[in-house]
């Protein structure tokens, strides 16, 4: 469990660096078939990276508070604590903030597993990108209004909303999600092109 | 586009559509898994140990110290968010959960340099607390209720007078001798250590500085910041304005452990 946790954290912290390097390599490769192979491998790794971000976020929000053991009441207490962080953004009513705080961790868990699985990667990466963009908009709004609150990301140590949190979210979370999104659509496009160009065989008539 | 290409593309699209139910069938276990993972983790009960947090004896508090939850609020009397928290959240909490012995509320002074009269307001509150808890509660309420007025001109004493009886007021005024706001203290951004030095002889400054030092260790980045202690274990700090509805839910979840 600890090894898995360490791996998740490493992917969250450094995965974007490997992805960016891989994207540069893919762009430099001239041979189309080789490029497709590189992109396919990058997509698998990218899915792991972006999936790790959401899995780590879900874990951070659900893990028991200090002194509490894993149990449904302790998970509920953690989500109630997260509800306070959501409300501190002062964007939603208490009811809406509460509902979001209780649904978001499960949504992040589902999306993380979906990304890691590689199923329908185009759609999972679109959803991931939209979710991260929405979060960055909320942070920007809180910062613009002068709020000094914890971002509530659940990943790593507490980070105050501000340019630093935005830079971290943009670089480590949004960039990998966008790279996976672009790669997934590019691969799909390349897959359709040869099939579209392939001639349909015609039957020979008897002489 | 020729007819053969159209046929190929049509074939691809039909294959893609046929694949959709399969995709959905694959997604369904994922949905179940996302609910099952927390359950599985709960099954392996892992006890996390944490050091118990030490709490110094507070002077400005509400409720019973033996309550299962302790809530320390680091605030500045001139901070509008602190006022909002006090009026909308802490007041109903004091009437409900504090009165019922579920929560022990502790006020910690954390006057910010940007607030011209915040430090002086803390001195008045501390003086009232020295007279008695009831007097402190009245003065604190008066400070927050009239924040908009005294924030402009610094005339805090006017509102302390209206909150206390004449006998209590005389006692508080006697305690406040030597605690008059110094000219340097009124400058925005004034170093608060200088405030303590220039108003040498003010008996309450060490208490305020003690609270501020405690806040800096947490660290308190803004006001209001609150720290919860549950069964002797300190939880991560939170800041910002929260509603009583959300806070109550959190208390209920802790009390239900």
Image: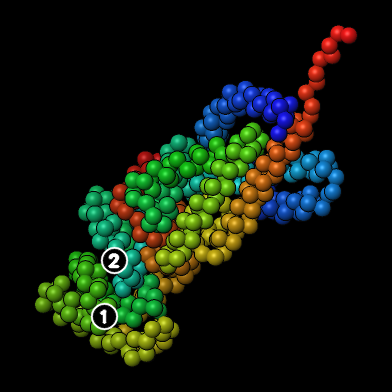
Q: Secondary structure at mark 2?
A: helix
As drawn, the residue found furthest toward the left would be B166
Is residue B220 placed above or below B47 in the rendered structure? Answer: below
Residue at image x 56%, y 39%? A111
Residue at the far right in the pictured view: A207
Q: Whole-percent x and y of residue B201?
A: 33, 87
B240 with respect to A65 (left or right): left
Horizontal and vertical percent position of residue B77 = 30, 72
Q: Position of residue A123 (x, y in %)?
A: 59, 38
Q: Residue at x 18, y 76 (%)?
A: B159
Q: How many marks?
A: 2
Q: Nearer the viewer, residue B222 or B168?
A: B222
Expressed as whole percent of the image width and height from the top left, the position of residue B79 reads 33, 70
Do discs 2 and 1 share a chain? yes
Q: CA distance from mark 2 to mark 1?
A: 15 Å
User: Is label 2 or label 1 in front?
Assistant: 1
Closest to the observer, B94 or A131: A131
Classify residue B235 as left or right of residue A194. Answer: left
Which quadrant, please, contains the C terminus of chain B? top left
Residue A15, numbered circle: none
Q: What residue is shown with label 1? A: B152
The chain under label 1 reads B
* N-terminal label among 2 and 1: 2
Against A199, residue B165 (above or below) is: below
Compared with B60, B179 (above or below) is: below
Is residue B167 or residue A198 the one in the foreground? A198
Location of residue A4 by image quarter: top right
Q: Which residue is mark 2?
A: B83
In the picture shown, does residue B78 fall above or below A96? Answer: below
């Amino acid at each position: 469990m600890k090894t898995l946790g360490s791996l998740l954290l490493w992917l969250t912290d450094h995965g974007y660096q490997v992805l960016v390097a891989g994207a540069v390599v893919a762009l430099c490769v001239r041979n189309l078939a080789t490029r497709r192979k590189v992109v396919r491998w990058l997509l698998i790794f990218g899915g792991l990276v972006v999936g790790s971000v959401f899995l780590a976020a879900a874990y951070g929000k659900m893990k028991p508070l200090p002194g509490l053991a894993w149990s449904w009441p302790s998970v509920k207490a953690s989500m109630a604590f997260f509800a306070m962080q959501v409300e501190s953004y002062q964007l939603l009513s208490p009811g809406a903030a509460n509902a979001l705080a209780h649904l978001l961790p499960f949504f992040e868990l589902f999306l993380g597993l979906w990304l890691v699985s590689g199923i329908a990667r185009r759609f999972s990466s679109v959803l991931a990108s939209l979710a991260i963009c929405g979060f960055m908009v909320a942070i920007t709004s809180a910062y613009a209004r002068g709020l000094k609150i914890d971002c509530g990301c659940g990943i790593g140590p507490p980070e105050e909303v501000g340019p630093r949190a935005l830079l971290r979210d943009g670089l480590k979370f949004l960039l990998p999600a966008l790279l996976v999104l672009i790669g997934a659509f590019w691969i799909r496009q390349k897959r359709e092109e040869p099939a579209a160009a392939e001639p349909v065989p015609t039957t020979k008539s008897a002489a | 586009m020729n007819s053969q290409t159209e046929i190929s593309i049509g074939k691809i699209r039909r294959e893609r559509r046929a694949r959709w139910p399969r995709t959905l069938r694959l997604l369904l276990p994922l949905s179940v898994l996302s609910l099952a993972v927390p359950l599985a983790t709960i099954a392996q009960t892992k006890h996390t140990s944490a050091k118990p947090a030490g709490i110094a004896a507070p002077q400005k508090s509400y409720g019973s110290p033996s309550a299962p939850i302790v809530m320390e609020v680091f605030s500045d009397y001139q901070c509008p968010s602190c006022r909002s928290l006090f009026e909308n959240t802490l007041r109903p909490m004091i009437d409900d959960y504090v009165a019922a012995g579920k929560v022990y509320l502790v006020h910690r002074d954390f006057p910010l340099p940007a607030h011209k009269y915040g430090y002086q307001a803390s001195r008045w509150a501390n003086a009232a607390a020295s007279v008695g808890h009831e007097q402190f509660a009245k003065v604190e309420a008066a400070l927050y209720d009239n924040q908009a007025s005294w924030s402009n001109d610094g005339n805090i004493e006017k509102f302390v007078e209206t909150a206390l009886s004449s006998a209590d007021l005389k006692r508080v005024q006697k305690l406040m001798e030597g605690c008059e706001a110094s000219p340097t203290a009124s400058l925005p951004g004034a170093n608060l250590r200088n405030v303590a030095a220039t108003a040498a002889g003010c008996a309450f400054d060490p208490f305020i500085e003690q609270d501020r030092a405690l806040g800096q260790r947490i660290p308190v980045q803004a006001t209001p910041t609150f720290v919860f202690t549950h069964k002797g274990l300190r939880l991560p700090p939170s800041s910002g304005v929260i509603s009583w509805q959300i806070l109550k839910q959190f208390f209920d979840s802790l009390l239900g452990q």
